[in-house]
Image: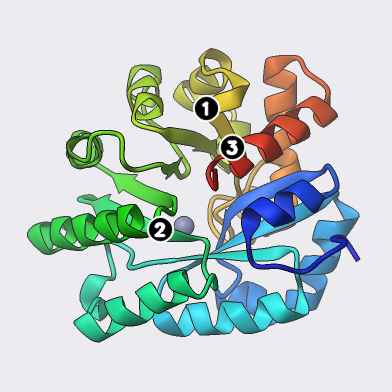
Amino acid sequence: MIYSIHSSLSSVLVSKMKIGWMDTHAHVMDASLLLQIDDVIKRCIENDVVSVTLICMSIEEIELGIRLQSKYPMLELFGGFHPVDITNDSIENYQKLEEFIINGKIVGIGEIGLDFYWDKQYRDAQIVAFRRQCELAIKHDVPINIHMRDATQEVYDIISSYKGQLRGVMHCYSGSVEMAKAFIKQGFLISLGGILTFKNAKSVIEVAEEIDLEHLLIETDSPYLTPHPYRGKLNEPSYVALVGEKLASIKNMEHFTIQTQMQKNYKRLFK
Ligand SMILES: [Zn+2]
């Protein structure tokens, strides 16, 4: 048993959690991982991963996540309507999303944001859905997890329009150091994924070098973006240890120092 108590409140969990790696962004509801979930969790424990944040992208995924969490207390849930799949953001589903927040079933909203790479057609609808979910986060004082692709300035403009009322995570960040600093000023943590371990990941490595540890998180975004040396294979939450080890070598710090600071940073999201 990893935790001495079981609660869906992150702040409680983190304070009771043993020191280890945290995967702050994973999609284990993907069939490729869900079908072997017992083994996925077992490998997390074997690799010193103490917490995995499931990113649920529909009401159905949140409901499934809640069932998984009752079996594996190391899981916690974010839920929201992803920018490339906002067709399910009906008024009824927004009400359900809000109920999950009120009942403490999800601890944050995400991933949400803008994606003008995969989806140019629904640009305006993406902006409406993103703003609506930002306002829900402000109303209930919960963090958001942001997906951003080919839309850095647009995401920044929306976040900054709320004048410091938002906080959250820039997931799988691959932008410039300068923009990372701008997002940090808006109350956001910069989360680095498997790309950090790639040989050609010049800009992400630069972000890891330049940004202070207190503003960083690590994640897998599994089953996508598998870190080296498993690149090309299925990604899973236990591989967050590889991202953490790479960050430790870039920062020239002990694993324990990285793990402790990542847990403190994550805890800060929940005040
Ligand atoms: Zn994701």
Q: On the picture, is 242 further left or further right than 134? A: right
Q: Is residue 118 visible?
A: no
Q: Is mark 1 within 8 Å of ligand 1?
A: no
Which of the two labelled residues, at mark 1 and mark 2, occupies the earlier sequence position? 2
Q: On the picture, is 92 further left or further right than 174? A: left
Q: Is mark 2 within 8 Å of ligand 1?
A: yes
- Look at 54% across and 48% down and name the residue there: 270
Estimate the x, y position of residue 121 in percent, counting from the top left: 10, 62
The N terminus: image quadrant:
bottom right
Circle 3 sits on which residue? 217
- Marks 1/3: CA distance? 21 Å
| Front one among 232 and 26 | 26
Quarter of the image for residue 267 reads: top right
Which of the two labelled residues, at mark 1 and mark 3, occupies the earlier sequence position? 1
Circle 1 sits on which residue? 200
Q: On the picture, is 197 further left or further right than 37? A: left
Estimate the x, y position of residue 17 in percent, counting from the top left: 80, 51
The dot on residue 111 is 2
Amino acid found under the numbered disc labelled 1: Asn
| Front one among 153 and 128 | 128
- Marks 1/2: CA distance? 26 Å
| Front one among 132 and 156 | 132
Check disc 3: other Cα within 10 Å, few if <14, some if 14-19, many if 20+: many
Amino acid found under the numbered disc labelled 2: Glu
The C terminus: image quadrant:
top right
